[in-house]
Image: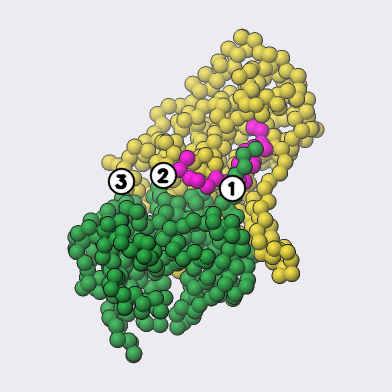
Chain colours: A yellow, B green
Amino acid sequence: MSELILDKARLGDFLKAVAKEYQLWTPAVVDGVADYRPFDPERPPERKIRTRLSIKRFFHPQRENMFRYSTDPEAQEANVLKETLPQGKTAVFGVSSCDARSVVLNGLVFVNDPNNPNQCPYYQARLDQTVLIGLGCNEPCATCFCHAVGGHPCGEEGLDLQFIDLGEKYLVKVLTDKGGQVASLHEMSPAGPAESEAAREVAKKARESMPGGFKIGQAVSQDLMAIFNLPLWEETAERCLNCGVCTFVCPTCYCFDILDEVQGQEGIRFRIWDSCMFPLYTLHASGHNPRPDKKERLRNRFMHKLKYFPDRYGGKLSCVGCGRCVTYCPVNIDIREVAARMKAV
Amino acid sequence: MIEVKNPFRPYPVRIDEVVVETNDKALRTYKLVFVDPEDEKAFQYQPGQFAELSVAGKGEIPIGIASSPTEPGFLLFTINRIGLVTNALHNMGPGQIMGVRGPLGNSYPLAQMKGANLLIIGGGYAFTTLRSTIVYLLDPANRQDYGDIHVVYGAREPGLLLYKAELEDWQKRQDINTYITVDREFPGWTGLCGFVPAVTEQHCPSPENTYALICGPPIMIKFTQPVLEKAGFPPERIIMSLENRMKCGFGLCGRCNVGNQYICKDGPVFTLAQLNNLPREY
């Protein structure tokens, strides 16, 4: 792993060079909303911000076209589905460590589950075509808890390049071959021992600034049915609106629906984000619904993230501690408080 | 770049034959033939598995495979007319092209049950994968691997029983004990009357070295389970097939989970012992 130095004044030039080879996205505040936007050379790159939506969409877009077909009976191979894989190289700059980790965790389900012979070719294609350029967090937010779920404010998991803010310059860590190719698009000098040490110090300080005392992962070792039957769910669900914003903004909520759409005689089968907060998600054709009420639906979301997923994937939580659900929940349901109560008394 | 097989891609199949199964015409059995023989080779299945049936422009539905791997050359699916895709299917006929994706899920533990007796209990239209199992067991290549076979199958009325010709054949055979019942007396019906749990209780074989396979509506399962437990069947040998709403069919899209298990991938077949440790979200 090599470490390089880029002057902050040259960041714009670096991004321009990347944008020549890749479709480049950077964080930007537009109309008061922080989100990833196509790179605009006229707009200076934002300082570190947390985007409202995570980078989930670069790997699992809100809508992914999967197949096309013709319903014209005269057409050759009428009604036979033809695969449409995503095309094009994408680079994302300014990715936080928590978001980058979500790509790895979701990848366990989509492409890296040793117990599943089926893998998702759409997720794999986007993994192959996307380069993630991280920017470590010097000052984690009050709603952040990446350190309590197995991450780190300057963590490297899932990233191809990692930028660490050293004040006047960035230390650039090359983490993968793909990252090396991107770094080579613009001249950078090798980092010296003092600069490497300064980057380690930034990471250490960021980590130390985060509060302790979290019990996010305690459900993992609890008996499934014991925590399933806690009164916690009834109480928490009283104020839940089942609006689904938590699942929408969550980087590790990956559930989807598959739908068909036909215009004229040209059809598309696509997948689209779905949410376990919605009654239709589990409604049987018979009218029976195994999770009929918001209590069952809210419970499923927390149980999935903090118990069911870890049970399947070696104890790893399906949460990266980004804090978006905490920020955007309209009734202030806080996963940190819920997790702390997921314990059989 | 890694070459990944696309598990979302349905194999093109042609509808070969449609048989109306029930008097109300709501259930029809579709005989499907693969357009490409290579696809048929790739589709190696076991009784108890299901597939996603695909109709271009409408969508997909998960349906149990009613044919048996001992019947090569085609697949059978019995479909209730109830939603968007099934309504579209009921308006399709021989010669038309649709899709099949699978096989999906686990299967009845046929290898594990070798040497044992079997009690097969079905109700209503949830008899499809049990038909697959029975046809498989009665195949001359397999029959000697198993002990006594008992089948209890019931429907509300005679006109709602599936696979009537085969039921009659099985009733004539010496190597399978078949108890066909309807909920209450019906003009012209000379067979058994009574609900499936009651008929099971009357004709229940010894639980000694016997597995019970149950597939039916929730109410039937609810009342049959205590009958089996009372008869002495341990939960490890009570085997059930579950259903939930599904989309992907292999553990990605999320919705069919029961606790930490996905019905589509870890099931649909579970033992009662497994289900006793899981939420009843099915």
> How far apart in space, not on screen, are marks 1 and 2 (Cα)?
27 Å
Q: Are marks 3 and 2 in contact (CB under 8 Å)?
A: no
Between residues B41 and A83, which one lies in front from this camera angle? Answer: B41
Q: Quadrant of the C terminus of chain A?
A: top left
- Mark 2 falls within which chain? A
Q: Is residue A244 visible?
A: no
Dividing the picture into quarters, in which one does residue A312 lie? top left
**Chain of residue at mark 3:** A
Q: Residue at x 54, y 34 (%)?
A: A101
Residue B12 coordinates in the image, percent (x, y)? 61, 62
Query: How many numbered marks does the figure carry?
Result: 3
The answer to whether residue A63 is seen in the rendering is: yes
**Which residue is tagged 2?**
A308
For marks 3 and 2, the one nearer the N-term is 3
Position of the N terminus of chain A, as image quadrant, is top right
**Same chain assignment for discs 1 and 3:** no
Disc number placed over residue A226 in the picture, else none: 3
**Could you tell me which residue is drawn at 37 percent across and 36 percent down?**
A218
Q: Residue at x 74, y 66 (%)?
A: A75
Provide the secondary structure element on which disc 2 rests: helix
Q: Badge 3 local density, few (<14 within 10 Å), some, or many (20+)? A: few
| Of residues A50 and B205, the one drawn nearer to the viewer in this rendering | B205
How many other residues sit within 10 Å of disc 1, few (<14), some (14-19) or many (≥20)?
few
**How far is the residue under mark 1 from the one under mark 3?**
40 Å
Magenta stretch in the rendered image: A114-135
Q: Bin the neighbour count of mark 2 within 10 Å (Cα to Cα): few under 14, some 14-19, many 20 and up.
A: many
Q: For marks 3 and 2, give the CA distance.
A: 13 Å
